[in-house]
Amino acid sequence: MSLVNKPAPKFSAPAVINGEEIVQNFSLEQYIGKKYVIFFFYPKDFTFVCPTEILAFQERLKEFEARGAVVVGCSTDTEETHLAWLSTPKEQGGIRGVTYPLVADVSKTIAYNYGVLGGEYDFNEQGEMIFNGAPIALRGTFLIDKQGIVRHEVVNHFPIGRSIDEELRTLNALIYTETHGEVCPANWKEGEEAMKATREGVKKYLSTH
């Protein structure tokens, strides 16, 4: 089920911040009332598509921050594995240089509550617990507003990398609608005309596009 228009699930978990420091009780609640949050899940540390996404977010980090947003990543790896990966140079498959927080969802409860765990627990005929699917996070991305409400989500399967451009575009659209009280039509980009959410507004927009 979609989380859009619902409060983002709360959690407290270990994380690595600033690329070098482990904290034990990281939470998104620290940003409520202050920042937009781009909260994204990725499957595993030391893999293939994941570092391209994580580093791409880092390359655009200042653009998100300029819009009053923070970026936070999360996988089901441990905080020690996060730190090891963050300490490994890019040419050796690492993500050294990433400064935004990476959360360690070892219990898998964060991924489950956000609906991105790549499978589900079940029981076999002997009554033993099993897991169907992959017990790691899908590539979920959530845009959370300053009140802690999810305003956008997209979930990709493991082989499909996400678009950082689209996440920035969606953040721009959310800020625009909050600021101007208008709505953003298909393929809207920052600096383009939006429209009023009325019949007349739609007619006016469509007549010029």
Image: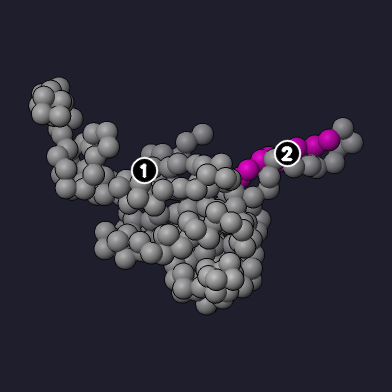
Q: Is residue 120 magenta?
A: yes
The amino acid pointed to by label 1 is Arg
Q: Is residue 165 magenta?
A: no
N-terminal of the pair, mark 2 or mark 1, is: 2
Q: Residue at x 56, y 41 (%)?
A: 157
Q: Which residue is mark 1?
A: 151
Q: Which residue occupies the extreme front position in the image? A: 91
Q: Which residue is mark 2?
A: 132
Instruction: State left or right for residue 169 relative to residue 130.
Output: left
Q: Nearer the viewer, residue 138 or 25?
A: 138
CA distance separating discs 2 and 1: 30 Å
Secondary structure at numbered mark 2 = strand
> Dot 1: within a 10 Å radius of its alpha carbon, few (fewer than 14), some, or many (20 or more) residues?
some
Query: Compared with residue 183, is residue 69 higher up or lower down, i.e. above or below?
Result: below
Query: Compared with residue 7, is residue 63 higher up or lower down, i.e. above or below?
Result: below
Q: Residue at x 46, y 73 (%)?
A: 97
Q: Residue at x 30, y 61 (%)?
A: 63
> Dot 2: within a 10 Å radius of its alpha carbon, few (fewer than 14), some, or many (20 or more) residues?
few
Residue 187: image location, x then y, percent? 27, 37
Q: Which residues are magenta?
A: 114-124
Evaluate whether residue 86 shows in this view: no
